[in-house]
Image (cartoon, rainbow, N blue to C red):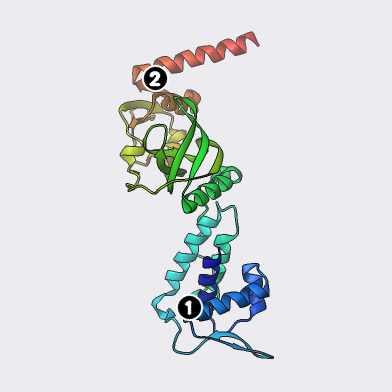
Amino acid sequence: MKTERLIGILSILLQEEKTTAPELAEMFEVSRRTINRDIEELCKAGIPIRTVQGPGGGISVMDGYRMDRTILTSRDMQMILAGLRSLDSVSGSRYYSQLMEKLRSGSSEFISGKDSMLIDLSSWYRSSLAPKIEAIQSAIENRDLLEFRYYAPSGESSRIIEPYFLVFRWSSWYVWGWCTAREDFRLFKLNRMDSVTETARGFDRRNVPLPEMSNEKIFPGGIRVKALFTPDTKWRLVEEFGPNCFTEADDGRLLFTADYTDMDDLVSWLLTFGAKAEVLEPEEARIRIRRNAEEVLQIYREG
C-alpha cells in the first residue's frame, strides 16, 4: 500500500498547484508523520518537491516538472471515472473511490456537467461478491493459492487454484486459474464459489494463457431448441436472446429457435414461462417438462 500511496501523492502534486500535509493525511487516511516520511521518500527518488511553512504555504512540485494534462480530454476523464466507479460497485474497500478522488483533484476543468455514464457491476449478489472479489484480488497480487468450495452441475467439491485473472463476462464474475486437482487452467464462476480463502501458501507464476471467453466457449450450444411462446413474452425473448431469435407463427405465437448449452438449464428456463411456452424440439425437453408438470400436479392434489 505504501507504493500505491506514493504514486497517489505524486499524482496529486502533479495535478495541483499546491496542497498541504493535513489534506494529504486526511485523503489517504494516515498520519501527518507518515505523509512527511512519504514526501522525504519522493525527494530521495529525485522528485523536486518544495515545501513552504506558515500561512499560505504548502507542498508543491517545482515548476517545469508538471505533467501536461492537456493530453486528457473531458471525455477521457469521464470514461476513466466511469470505469473506476463501476469497479467500486463491487469493491469491498474504498480503494477505487479514493483513486477517483485523486484523479478528480485539480482536474475540474476536464470534468464538466454531470456524469453521463453510470455502470453498476454488483448485480443482486453485491454483499456476497465483494468479499470474494477482494480475497481473489489479494491472492492474485500476493501470488497465494486460493481455496474454496465449488458447486457445479456435476456436484460439489473442494478446489485449490493458482488465481491469475478476475473476469466479468455475460453479467457474471469468474476467476481464471490453474486448478491443482485437474492440473489444467479452469474458469470458475464466483456465484458458485463458497468459503473463498486466500491461503498462506505461495506459488510460482506460470506462463498463463488468456481465458477463452467467446460466446461459443461460455455457451457452446449443441441442443437445438424450437418452441412457441405467447406474444406477451416477447420482451423476455428480446432481452435474453435478441430480436432475431423468433418469427411470428400463423396463430400469432412466437416461434423461437436457438442453440442451447445444457438440457437441465434449458428445461429450468422453459418452466419459468409456465403455460406461455410450448416446446416443439427437442423431444427430451418435452418429456421432462411433462413429467415435471405431472409431479407438481400430484403434489397439489395431495395437498
The answer to whether any part of residue 235 appears in the image is no
The Cα atoms of the two marked residues, 1 and 2, are separated by 68 Å
At 63% from the left and 81% from the top, the residue drawn is 20
Can you identify the residue that label 2 sits on? Answer: 285
- Left or right of 183? Residue 153 is right
Front disc: 1 or 2 = 1
- Please determine whether, in this image, residue 59 is positioned above or below residue 145: below
Whole-percent x, y for residue 265 in the image: 43, 27
Is 61 on the left or on the right of 53, as rendered? left
Q: Nearer the viewer, residue 246 or 148?
A: 148
* Helix, strand or loop under label 2: helix
Q: On screen, 29 above or below 253? A: below
Residue type, numbered disc 2: Ala
State the residue at coordinates (55%, 63%): 1
Q: Amino acid at mark 1?
A: Ala
Q: Which mark is residue 45?
A: 1
Residue 206 in sight: yes
Q: What element does badge 1 sit on?
A: loop
Choose between 207 and 17: the one closer to the eye.
207
Using the image, determine if residue 215 lies above or below residue 77: above
Using a 10 Å C-alpha cutoff, classify the residue at mark 1 as few (fewer than 14 neighbours), some (14 to 19) or many (20 or more). Answer: few
Residue 158, position in %: x, y?
50, 31
